[in-house]
Amino acid sequence: MLISLDWIRDFTDVPNVSSKDIYSKFTLATAEVEDVQTVGEHLEKIVIAEILSFEKHPEADKLNLVTFTIGNNDVRKVVCGASNVKVGIKIPYASIGVKLPNGLLLEPKKIRGVLSEGMLCSEEELGFAEESEGIMELPADAPLGVNMLTYFKMKKDTILDIDNKSLTHRPDLWGHFGMAREFSTIFDIPLKNRFTKEWSDNLKKKYTNEKSPISVRFDGESAGISYFGLSMKNVTVGESPDWLKNRLKATGLRSINNIVDVSNYVMLELGMPLHIFDRDLIAGGEVVIKKLAGETTFKTLDEVDRKLIAGDTVISDSNGPLVLAGIMGGLNSGVSEKTKNIFIEVANWKPAMVRRTSTRLGLRSDSSQRFEKTLDSKLTERTLLRTVEMILELCPGAEVVGKAEYAGIDLNSIPVLKIETTLKKIKTVLGFDLTEERLLNIFAHLDFETTKQGDKFLVTIPSYRSTKDIEQEADLIEEVGRIIGYDNILPGSPLDIIAPVKLTEMQKVQRRVRDFMVLQAKAFETMSYPLIGDSLLKKVSWPTSTSLKLIDSLSVDHNLMRPSLIPSLLEVCETNAKNFDRFRFFELGRAYTEDQKSFAKEALHLGAVFADKEKNPYVDMINVVSNLLSSLNLSAEFVERNAKFSNPLVPTEWIGNHPFEFQNIRVMGKFVGAVFSVHPMVLRALKVKGHVCICLFDLSMFENFSAKDKTKYKPLSKFPSSTFDWTVVAAPETLASEVLGACKKVKLKELKEVQILDIFSNENKKFVTIRATLADEAQTLTSELLKQAETALIDATSKAGFNLK
């Protein structure tokens, strides 16, 4: 977006500092300036000269050696190839060192052996025309030696090329007046606001008591928010004055005629687009804003046929569409040199609908770009009056017919945004020692009305800043910070007290679980995605699916919230089985179930997997889980599967459940987990060989559980311990826990631990090997005591029906 500093100076006196200072301050405070161009600087160095004589170049027939003067007996020679060289004509002369708009830097140069002292310039080389033939001829009374800038009464101008992508949240800066307020604030200089209530009232006096020739109306729902229309007569369409053409050219637009140029000029000045019709081409005396009911073809001002569809908003007369709302006018109702009567339209449109239509048609106009940014409907009337003012200035014979016609929302109903803040809060957040006077000055420059209420400031935000920019106190603080300059805020150490974060009870439990599984169970921790797909559930033969499905998922393999941790654990197991014969891993992850009250319910589960290609790790898993629960001070018991009681974590109907190797974990009377081997049928589908055992435990059941560490430290025993292994015979359906239960009934103070060492079976019997650990902290165990203990343990298992092998 191109911004003219000369135009900005109509509204505020930007200081005469270097271009670098201007663009650096604006970049730091508001938006990035991508480039700075100086317009008219070359004209100050190009002067009026008069040709005295010319002769053919000795080495080239098409070149002339021209002798001329710039006054005061200053006679020079140049080589010139123009065909319209004549003695006595006045022409523009650029001397050595001048840089022309086309980028050419004039240097001393020999042309076919003759030194040329500069250049006689054409209109194209001066930047006055896109194409020209021959050198520019000036009037005979043009004074010699006067530079072109002075002669044409032009001004030098600095053009800032601003990155408009950084202004999408600032629709107020899409016009020079809004930009002038920004410069006024940045440089702390007054804003010359000529658009006052008095100015508005004076222009409204131009309204007449006649009936407006064109009325306006909304027909149903559309993209329209507000719509002003005004009729004028006796306009004269012609060429725009030089000052208007120069400003449009400096900001990237070409002049068409004075009426069209006014519409572009007002848009670039106030930021609100508008459209001017040839009123005589509007049929029916009424314009209607409505959605199209069906497809139609519409020729826009760029002479392209556009295919509009049902739902596109248009402004129509009785014959059909005149304007594609918020984007571009139609060719058939545009202003031409024959136009005498006009109708001015200034409206505001819903940004999303304008962008949708603009994108579909591939038509991005200056208007659509602005409407997409959410403009303020309260600025529409000001834009209308400014347009009227300029047309009356350029067409002195023009008159207003009737008054401004309006349709749309009640502009007085637009809510006023008020935000509370304090000087202390702003200073604390910014870390800058700001005075109250400086704060109020910044707010005043930004057009924020401020009322003091004790220590608080009630800040009223103008409607053009509250459309999508200022919303809360943090935005006010940001405004103050950028105007002060973030580079002026000295960095300092934070004043907050830095203290260790206190862990919740659940976090403590999770840490203890991780420590135990890594250090004691020798397992790696994994983290899998909670998003899975139906393909994984089918692979592991999971009996149920879930309705917790993402609407816009990344892929079909990640569109469901997993109902259990088991499918994810088996997927990780499948990957690792390709590279390792045995491995252990665990995960603390979440599972999600449907819930009628809160839509979904999530639970934190511990899942552990022991896999071994040769040896069944089922017994090891039971021992590890038992020790884990003991370390968490949970009084848990392992309970065999019963058809009357289902485990909420593992579906009974899942074919992955092993028929024998399955133990429920019960804590405080509730099933909170399970330890089980995976059925070979599921392992075969995953191409996993050997044995896989899983532990699943619901940690969310103990959200408020306090995992107090009851560990008591004591010196290591000075006396050795002794282990005793024996193997008993049991029925095939006997659980290992029953054998352990029989051993634990033995009352021996020296018996420290009893655990299952191994299990092996044949067709008719199960053989269970048990290991007992005996120790005495006060003395060395005697052989007699060890023999008595061994006998007691063997007798206890025998009485329970488990005879010694």
Image (cartoon, helix red, strand yellow):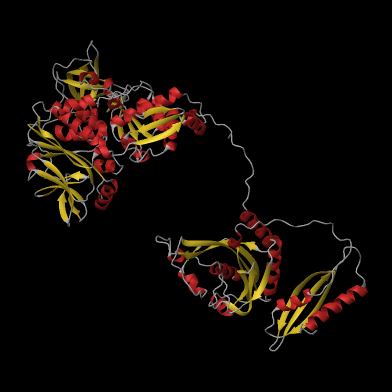
- How many marks overall? 0
Give whichever of 750, 236 is nearer the camera.
750
Q: Can residue 63 be spotted in the picture?
A: no
Residue drawn 21% across the image and 52% down it: 312
* Image spot of residue 502 (x, y percent): 63, 47
How far across and down, in percent of the image, does residue 475 sit?
A: 42, 37
For residue 47, above or below residue 660? above
Residue at the bottom extreme? 764
The quadrant holding residue 130 is top left
- The relative height of residue 660 versus residue 464 in the rendered view (above or below) is below
Residue 730 visible? The answer is: yes
Q: In which quarter of the image is residue 647?
A: bottom right
Image coordinates of residue 371 in percent, x first then y, are 27, 42
Residue 332 at x, y percent in the picture: 11, 45
Q: Is residue 346 left or right of residue 529?
A: left
Of residue 407 and residue 581, the one placed in the foreground of this image is 407
Quarter in which the C terminus is drawn: bottom right
Describe residue 761's horizontal placement relative to residue 398 as left or right: right
In the picture provided, is 122 more to the left or to the right than 734?
Answer: left
